C-alpha cells in the first residue's frame, strides 16, 4: 500500500508521520522544484513530536507533476489550492484507489469528486490539533477523531478498515455530508469573530454579543433547508461547547491571518452565503459578517476570496 500526501503543512505532515510510524510506505508530493529542493536539503527528515517526545522519519518526496503511481492520496492542502494541486496527480491513482479530502469548509470536496471520478473520493472531518514550529517539524498538540465517509454511499475501503485507530483514530460515517455541514456552521459561528477581534475561541461569545445568537439562528435555518434538521437542533449547544472546550485555541482562520496567508473565507462564509441565497433565506447577520470579514482582510492586504 503506497500513500501519497498532497500538502506538506501541519496536517499533511501529521498524517505522513503517523503513517510512517506505523510502517506504511509514504511519500510527499511537492508542487514546485523549490519546495522539493528545500525538503531534500533537510535530508527529507520529518520530526513528529507528541507530548514532548520526538521521532524522526525519512519521508521521500517527488514533484506532483512526475509522481509515481499510488494507492491512496491524502489531500491536505488548503481548500482554495485543491484544484491546482490535484490537476497534475489524480490520474496517477491506482485502479481501485482512494482520495481522502481533509479540507475545511465545503466546495473543494465536491470538485474533487467530479475531477477524480470514477475513483472513490472520501470526505473527512478532522479534530486533531497540529502546528509547525519550523519546517519539517510537526507538533501533534491535540489528539482528535477523523470522521470519514463516502458521500456517494460507497463502502468503507479495505485499507481504511485495516488502519488501526492507534495510527489514526477514525470512524466511518454513512452521512458524511451532514457532518461537514454541521462543521461548516460551527466554523461560520466562531472563526470570523476570532479574526475580526483578533481573539482566541473562548472570547467569541463576549466579543460577538447578541450577533452570535442571531447568526446561529440563521445557520440553523440553513441547515434545515439543506435537510439536516437534527444538526440544526444541536447547533446552539455545539457552538457553545466548542467555544468552551477550545477556549485557548486560535482558529485556523486567525492563524492564517496572523501568518499573512490567504484564508478559506469563500469555502466557509462564502459557501454558506451562496447556499442561503439558493434557498431564498434571509440571513442578514451572516451576509453582514461576510462583508465585514472581506473588508477586514482587504485592509490587511489579504485576498478576500
Image (cartoon, rainbow, N blue to C red):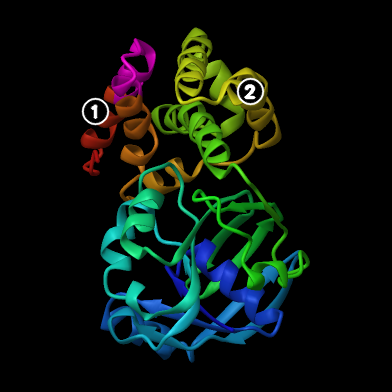
Residue under the image location 31 percent in, 17 percent down: 288
Q: Is residue 287 magenta?
A: yes
36 in relation to 107, above or below: below
- Quick one: quadrant of the N terminus? bottom right
Query: In this orientation, does residue 259 appear?
Result: no
Residue under the image location 31 percent in, 14 percent down: 280
Question: CA gap, disc 1 to disc 2?
Answer: 34 Å
213 in relation to 291, above or below: above
- Residue 230's disc number: 2
Residue under the image location 39 percent in, 65 percent down: 118
In the image, residue 84 lies at what x, y percent?
A: 26, 63
In the image, residue 81 lies at what x, y percent?
A: 31, 58
Which of the 4 quarters of the picture holds residue 8?
Answer: bottom left
Q: Nearer the viewer, residue 55 or 281?
A: 281
Number of marks in picture: 2
The secondary structure that most of the magenta stretch takes on is helix
> Could you classify mark 2 by the number of other residues whose Cα lies within 10 Å: few (under 14), some (14-19), or many (20 or more)?
few
**Secondary structure found at label 1:** helix
Which of the 4 quarters of the picture holds residue 57?
Answer: bottom right
- Quick one: quadrant of the C terminus? top left
In the image, residue 33 lies at what x, y percent?
A: 27, 83
Camera-side mark, 1 or 2:
2
Query: In this orientation, does residue 13 appear?
Result: yes
Reading the image, the residue beneath label 1 is 295
Whichever of labels 1 and 2 marks the residue nearer the N terminus, that label is: 2
Q: Nearer the viewer, residue 54 or 20?
A: 20
Query: Magenta part of the protein: which range?
Result: 276-290
Q: Is residue 153 magenta?
A: no
- Residue 285's disc number: none
Amino acid at each position: 500500500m503506497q500513500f501519497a500526501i498532497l500538502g506538506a503543512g501541519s496536517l499533511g505532515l501529521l498524517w505522513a508521520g503517523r503513517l510512517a510510524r506505523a510502517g506504511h510506505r509514504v511519500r510527499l508530493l511537492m508542487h514546485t522544484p523549490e519546495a522539493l529542493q528545500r525538503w531534500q536539503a533537510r535530508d527529507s527528515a520529518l520530526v513528529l513530536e507528541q507530548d514532548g517526545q520526538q521521532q524522526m522519519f525519512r519521508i521521500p518526496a517527488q514533484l506532483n507533476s512526475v509522481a509515481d503511481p499510488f494507492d491512496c492520496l491524502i489531500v491536505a492542502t488548503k481548500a482554495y489550492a485543491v484544484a491546482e494541486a490535484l490537476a497534475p496527480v489524480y490520474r496517477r491513482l491506482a485502479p481501485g484507489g482512494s482520495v481522502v479530502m481533509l479540507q475545511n469548509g465545503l466546495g473543494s470536496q465536491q470538485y474533487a469528486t467530479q475531477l477524480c471520478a470514477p475513483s472513490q473520493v472520501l470526505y473527512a472531518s478532522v479534530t486533531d490539533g497540529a502546528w509547525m514550529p519550523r519546517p519539517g517539524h510537526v507538533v501533534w498538540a491535540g489528539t482528535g477523531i477523523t470522521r470519514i465517509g463516502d458521500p456517494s454511499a460507497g463502502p468503507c475501503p479495505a485499507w481504511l478498515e485495516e488502519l488501526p485507530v492507534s495510527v489514526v483514530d477514525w470512524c466511518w460515517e454513512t452521512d458524511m455530508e451532514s457532518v461537514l455541514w454541521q462543521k461548516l456552521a460551527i466554523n461560520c459561528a466562531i472563526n470570523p469573530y476570532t479574526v475580526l477581534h483578533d481573539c482566541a475561541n473562548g472570547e467569541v461569545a463576549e466579543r460577538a454579543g447578541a450577533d452570535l445568537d442571531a447568526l446561529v439562528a440563521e445557520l440553523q435555518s440553513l441547515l434545515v433547508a439543506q435537510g439536516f434538521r437534527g444538526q440544526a437542533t444541536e447547533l446552539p449547544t455545539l457552538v457553545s461547547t466548542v467555544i468552551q472546550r477550545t477556549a485557548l485555541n486560535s482558529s485556523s482562520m486567525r492563524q492564517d491571518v496572523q501568518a499573512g496567508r490567504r484564508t478559506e473565507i469563500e469555502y466557509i462564509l462564502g459557501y454558506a452565503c451562496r447556499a442561503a441565497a439558493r434557498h431564498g433565506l434571509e440571513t442578514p447577520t451572516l451576509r453582514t459578517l461576510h462583508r465585514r470579514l472581506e473588508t477586514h482582510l482587504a485592509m490587511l492586504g489579504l485576498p478576500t476570496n
